[in-house]
Image (cartoon, helix red, strand yellow):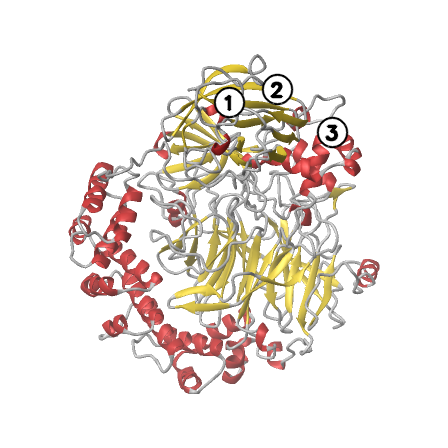
């Protein structure tokens, strides 16, 4: 048997480095951690799984992150522990020549490899541990960014997969993705385009991967899909994703996954049939979705990081607190989290509001580099030994070469509760061909936590057919505490015996029964009983079944349930089913039904279907808004869809944009004042000039009209009680920076106060208060330091309101030396983080907050920097600021849109629906682009962050900003 095994010298070197040290991840006191493998055996290990012998299989290689057509392909390696000491000592190259491998799944002798733009099946036909048959099942699935992940075989025999929103090239006749993928991306093709291309079979020598340039190439949305184990019958399960990196299911075949977002935090979701989770929605975007009826809600707290691998853990020998949990890897924060699930009706949710790490590097990483402990977790599995196995990426973001050889680090860790002693399952039956196994041996594997064991056992039981049914039925009837065995047994029976007569002795069996009936397309004659079940999960399964089976004869029951259903998830699926089963006219008529719940369901279905002309939709929504006694939920949805075209009767105070409502203060406006003191002892304080805010500390007069030049600027809110002062008054304050001050004076005065006349220059701008008083604006430049101002009516005879003082600070100074990484780092010891915060936040400084957010302050158009110090050091921060395109955070490359009118828009994509794209452009402004007006869209290999800061900032100012960012650590 040919094996590609490393030399003994290399093995000796590797094993001697596997001793525990401070490079290992931090785990709880009741957990142990060990290193199974490291470089050179593994480098940048990404996807991991276990084969039928319980051996670790790793997908890795040089393909990530910027491969060229000639870049060597990734490989799947079998990592061996030949002496049984729980440390890897050799490896076999099982299959090679792939694009970036981001998902693996075994079934029998077939290994499925997610390597976008391809989905490839490889098999070893002669049992020599080297794949000799390669089948390219799908191609043109988009690039390695937002690619193909999450391969899992379910108890229904289907292959499930998660797909990001990168789209294929769609070049006829050879580069064509299967139709469901094209549907997700919004790609149109000629009518005679095949649903999918025929699979292409080759051998190890002549297999050729497809190539797709790694730059972002986004379609409308990503999805969760499933197909048969030959690639046929591919269908969409859920959609509305941006980059769902991994998915898995629990003992009851209930899914959970993670989706990466660039601006709002990563999302945990529980996909179900027909669900849309927001990204690329037909008309209404909401990332979290919890209170957003047009989309399905999230299943837990959003987290700023990079959610990667996820696995369900319910090992019986584990302590209770580590059972019935999901484990989620976060590559960016370099942590593995515990997610404890619970059910709120049919809504899968987190038991706690914060994810708790079970393994951590102690600090996060920057995109280009990680430092400290060698723990950059990507994929995760429960091994045959019942330990948790985690693949850890190398230090660099992508392939790193030294002396023309791949030089990235790599780790495979094992962690487990100290209560157990992890040992490989050494059952002798694994040495036999599975066809020779006894039924009891097959049943032992059917209840296993290892995917390949339970999948293979199920397939063999199904092949043996009805002779296995007695044992299967007996197993199901037992009061077993092994829920996984119960689920897989029920499905095995259902796949052998196509019948609606299935065991339903408990909640899990009842749920699996409905699913199996749906799968077999044979439902119980009294199926309607499920609609009246007190448990929302049962009702939800019944509604989804009717939608999948397209049983239009159940529309009446769906309508009846829609009238009364209160569960968030069940109601969502009710209107989704009505959308599938009812015509547009039926839904329009349903909008006029008496029951508010049914009206709302029909409206949501009609809007999601989006078949009616826009004018008709808008008219319908306006009519609903104006209907007397209308349900508030219907009003909210109708107004949202009509984009505010519904106008209410106005009574009393006008509801105008001039501002009767106080807006939230702009938290990025810095305070240029300190030590504000009035000799009268009245209240004088810092605030920002905004419509609807009070002018004075002791009056309710508000800003009604503000010139753009002063919008959102800092000002001193004075006391109007001091307006009559003509002597014996002084206002003093300290200016922290050189500033242009603005004296805002009541125009009823015949002149400025004596202390100000001849010193302040009059401008052409005015402010108007809510009382109709016009105030003139004067300006004067001041150096930093103490400022003294006099009384309001010094030398003035007219009665008038007190003056106000506004400021525009000058935070940037002239450059005396070139700004570089080295020059900035030189000034870091003397840097002031407080000044750095002002430079970061202020529009008169570097204005970083126009795109970046820190602790909730600023716009979230770019990576959140609230804990950047956990991930970056001073040099990396300086590099990121001065050379932003050197290493671009995933998802933040600039997107360019060429419009029909000749204009070109470039910026960061914030939101995307089927009709509109929201783009953040330079300076933090947001524009909306109609998809119908786009003629070309392209991802650019540059950051949307402008490369201007080497010219804008001097070295000391850059050092101040770095000092501020170095204070931003995870609390």
Badge 2 element: strand
In 3D space, how far apart are the residues under numbered discs 3 and 2 (Cα atoms)?
Answer: 25 Å
Residue underneath mark 2: 781
Crowdedness near tag 1: few (<14), some (14–19) or many (≥20) residues, C-alpha within 10 Å: many
Residue closest to the eye, 27 or 971: 971
Q: Quadrant of the C terminus?
A: bottom right
In 3D space, how far apart are the residues under numbered discs 2 and 1 (Cα atoms)?
Answer: 22 Å
Residue underneath mark 1: 793
| Vertical position of residue 826 compared to residue 595: above or below | above
Task: Tell me whether circle 1 and circle 3 mark residues in contact (CB < 8 Å).
Answer: no
Residue 318 lies, in percent from the top left, at: 61, 77
Badge 1 element: loop
Closer to viewer: mark 2 or mark 1: 1
Badge 3 element: helix
Residue underneath mark 3: 955
Q: Looking at the image, is mark 3 or mark 2 earlier in the sequence?
A: 2
Crowdedness near tag 2: few (<14), some (14–19) or many (≥20) residues, C-alpha within 10 Å: some
Crowdedness near tag 3: few (<14), some (14–19) or many (≥20) residues, C-alpha within 10 Å: many
| Vertical position of residue 830 compared to residue 62: above or below | above
Residue 17 lies, in percent from the top left, at: 81, 61
Q: Looking at the image, is mark 2 or mark 1 earlier in the sequence?
A: 2
Residue 319 lies, in percent from the top left, at: 61, 77
């Amino acid at each position: 048997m040919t094996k590609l095994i490393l030399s003994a010298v290399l093995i000796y070197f590797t094993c001697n480095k596997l001793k525990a040290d401070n490079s290992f991840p931090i785990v709880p006191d009741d957990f142990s951690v060990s290193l199974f493998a490291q470089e050179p055996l593994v480098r940048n290990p990404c996807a991991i799984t276990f084969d039928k012998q319980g051996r670790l299989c790793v997908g890795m290689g040089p393909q990530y992150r910027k491969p060229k057509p000639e870049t060597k392909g990734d490989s799947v390696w079998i990592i061996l522990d030949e002496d049984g000491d729980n440390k890897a000592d050799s490896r076999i190259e099982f299959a090679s020549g792939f694009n970036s491998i981001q998902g693996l799944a075994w079934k029998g002798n077939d290994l499925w490899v997610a390597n976008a733009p391809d989905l490839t099946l490889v098999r070893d036909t002669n049992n020599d541990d080297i794949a000799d048959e390669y089948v390219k099942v799908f191609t043109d699935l988009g690039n390695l960014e937002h690619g193909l992940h999450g391969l899992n075989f379910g108890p229904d025999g289907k292959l499930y997969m998660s797909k990001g929103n990168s789209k294929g090239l769609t070049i006829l006749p050879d580069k064509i993705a299967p139709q469901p993928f094209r549907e997700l991306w919004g790609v149109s093709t000629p009518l005679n385009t095949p649903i999918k291309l025929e699979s292409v079979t080759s051998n190890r020598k002549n297999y050729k991967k497809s190539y797709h340039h790694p730059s972002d190439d986004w379609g409308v949305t990503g999805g969760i899909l499933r197909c048969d184990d030959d690639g046929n019958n591919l269908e969409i399960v859920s959609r509305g994703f941006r980059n769902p990196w991994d998915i898995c299911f629990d003992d009851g075949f209930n899914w959970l996954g993670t989706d990466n977002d660039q601006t709002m935090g990563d999302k945990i979701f529980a996909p179900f049939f027909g669900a849309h989770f927001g990204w690329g929605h037909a008309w209404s975007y909401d990332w979290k979705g919890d209170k957003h009826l047009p989309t399905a809600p999230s299943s837990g707290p959003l987290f700023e990081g990079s959610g990667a691998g996820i696995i369900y853990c319910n090992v019986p020998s584990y302590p209770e607190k580590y059972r019935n949990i999901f484990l989620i890897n976060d590559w960016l924060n370099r942590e593995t989290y515990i997610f404890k699930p619970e059910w709120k009706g049919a809504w899968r949710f987190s038991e706690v509001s914060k994810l708790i790490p079970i393994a951590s590097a102690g600090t996060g990483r920057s995109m280009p580099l990680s430092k400290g402990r060698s723990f950059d977790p990507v994929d995760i599995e429960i091994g045959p030994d019942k330990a948790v196995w985690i693949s850890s990426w190398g230090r660099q973001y992508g392939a790193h070469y030294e002396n023309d050889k791949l030089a990235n680090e790599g780790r495979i860790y094992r962690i487990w509760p100290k209560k157990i002693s992890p040992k490989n399952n050494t059952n002798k039956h694994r040495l036999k061909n599975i066809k020779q196994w006894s039924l009891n041996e097959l049943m032992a594997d059917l209840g296993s936590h290892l995917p390949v064991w339970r999948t293979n056992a199920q397939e063999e039981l199904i092949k043996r057919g009805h002779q296995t049914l007695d044992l299967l039925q007996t197993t199901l009837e037992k009061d077993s505490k092994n829920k996984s065995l119960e689920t897989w047994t029920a499905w095995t029976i259902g796949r052998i015996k196509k019948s609606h007569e299935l065991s339903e002795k408990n909640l899990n069996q009842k749920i699996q029964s409905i699913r199996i009936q749906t799968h077999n397309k044979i439902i119980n004659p009294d199926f309607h009983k499920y609609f009246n079940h007190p448990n929302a999960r049962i009702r939800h399964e019944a509604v989804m079944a009717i939608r999948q089976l397209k049983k239009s004869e159940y529309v009446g029951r769906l309508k009846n349930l829609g009238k009364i259903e209160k569960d968030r998830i069940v109601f969502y699926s009710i209107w989704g089913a009505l959308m599938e089963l009812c015509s547009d006219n039926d839904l329009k008529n349903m909008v006029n039904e008496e029951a508010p719940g049914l009206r709302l369901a029909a409206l949501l279905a009609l809007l999601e279907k989006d078949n009616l002309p826009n004018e008709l939709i808008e008219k319908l929504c306006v009519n609903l808004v104006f209907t007397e006694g209308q349900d508030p939920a219907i009003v909210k949805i109708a107004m949202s869809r009509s984009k505010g075209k519904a106008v209410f009767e106005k009574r009393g105070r006008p509801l105008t944009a001039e501002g009767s409502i106080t807006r939230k203060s702009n938290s990025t406006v810095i305070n240029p004042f300190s030590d504000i003191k009035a000799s009268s002892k009245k209240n004088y304080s810092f605030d920002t000039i905004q419509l609807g805010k009070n002018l004075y500390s002791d009056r309710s007069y508000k800003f009604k009209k503000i010139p753009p030049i002063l919008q959102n600027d800092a000002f001193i809110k004075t006391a109007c009680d001091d307006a009559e002062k003509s002597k014996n008054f002084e206002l003093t304050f300290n200016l922290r920076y050189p500033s242009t001050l603005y004296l805002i004076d009541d125009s009823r005065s015949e002149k400025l106060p004596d202390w100000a006349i001849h010193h302040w220059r009059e401008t052409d701008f005015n402010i108007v208060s809510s009382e109709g008083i016009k105030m003139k604006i004067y300006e004067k430049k001041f150096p930093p330091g103490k400022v003294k101002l006099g009384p309001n009516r010094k030398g003035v005879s007219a009665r008038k309101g007190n003056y106000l003082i506004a400021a525009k600070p000058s935070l940037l100074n002239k450059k005396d030396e070139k700004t570089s990484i080295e020059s900035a780092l030189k000034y870091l010891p003397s840097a002031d983080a407080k000044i750095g915060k002002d430079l970061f936040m202020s529009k008169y400084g570097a204005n970083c907050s126009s795109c970046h957010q820190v602790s909730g302050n600023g716009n979230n158009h770019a990576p959140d920097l609230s804990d950047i110090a956990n991930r970056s050091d001073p040099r990396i921060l300086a590099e990121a600021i001065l050379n932003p395109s050197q290493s671009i955070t995933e998802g933040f490359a600039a997107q360019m849109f060429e419009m029909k009118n000749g204009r070109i828009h470039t910026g960061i994509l914030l939101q995307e629906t089927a009709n509109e794209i929201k783009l953040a452009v330079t300076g933090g402004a947001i524009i909306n682009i109609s998809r119908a007006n786009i003629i070309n869209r392209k991802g650019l290999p540059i950051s949307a962050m402008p490369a201007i800061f080497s010219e804008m900032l001097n070295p000391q100012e850059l050092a101040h900003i770095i000092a501020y960012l170095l204070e931003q650590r995870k609390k």
